Image (spheres, helix red, strand yellow):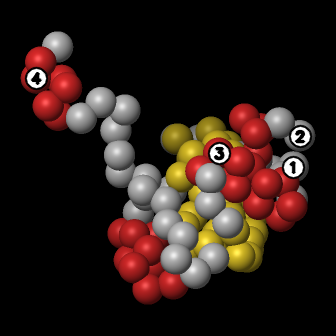
Amino acid sequence: MEMKDTLVRPIITEKSTNDLGSDRTYAFEVGLEANKADIKRAIETYYGVQVDAVRTLVVRGKIKRAGRYSGKRSNWKKAYVTLAQGQSINLFTSSASAADRKQG
């Protein structure tokens, strides 16, 4: 399984950012077929950190209606990744700083 199929995106929510300070836990949306070993390898390779534990869950898609038509959203998988002591990921950095954007 390739990294692009394993890691979809980091999940930046109020709940996930509150957990960042206390127990080094980060939330990611991952592929449905990804297992814990694949997720650990992808995080360590992409972010260059040491992963301590990975917990996964499948978020079931909601049934939605529009008038008389109903449909179901797709299921997706979420992973909570706990990093080793002293490790961190900065999810809020941009590719170009504000000073660089002013000059260009």
Mark nearer the N terminus (1 vs 4): 1
Callout 2 touching callout 4 (CB < 8 Å):
no
What number is the disc on residue 1? 2
Amino acid type at image mark 3: Tyr
**In screen coordinates, is 54 left or right of 1?**
left
Mark nearer the N terminus (2 vs 1): 2
- Rendered location of residue 64, percent (x, y): 59, 50
Q: Quadrant of residue 44?
A: bottom right
Gap in angstroms between the C-alphas marked 1 and 3: 19 Å
Gap in angstroms between the C-alphas marked 2 and 3: 14 Å
What number is the disc on residue 33? 1
- Name the outermost residue toward the left: 102
Gap in angstroms between the C-alphas marked 1 and 4: 43 Å
Q: Which residue is mark 4?
A: 102
**In screen coordinates, is 33 left or right of 53?**
right
Q: Which residue is mark 3?
A: 46
Q: Is residue 50 visible?
A: yes
Mark nearer the N terminus (1 vs 3): 1
Callout 3 touching callout 4 (CB < 8 Å):
no
Q: How many marks?
A: 4
Q: Mark 4: few, some, or many residues within 10 Å (few <14, many ≥20)?
A: few
Q: Nearer the viewer, mark 1 or mark 3?
A: 3
Callout 2 touching callout 1 (CB < 8 Å):
yes
Amino acid type at image mark 1: Glu
Which element type, helix, strand or loop, lies under badge 1? loop
Q: Mark 3: few, some, or many residues within 10 Å (few <14, many ≥20)?
A: few
Q: Residue, x 86% and y 61% (percent of image)?
A: 37
Mark nearer the N terminus (3 vs 4): 3
- Rendered location of residue 31, percent (x, y): 76, 47
Mark nearer the N terminus (2 vs 3): 2
Gap in angstroms between the C-alphas marked 2 and 1: 9 Å
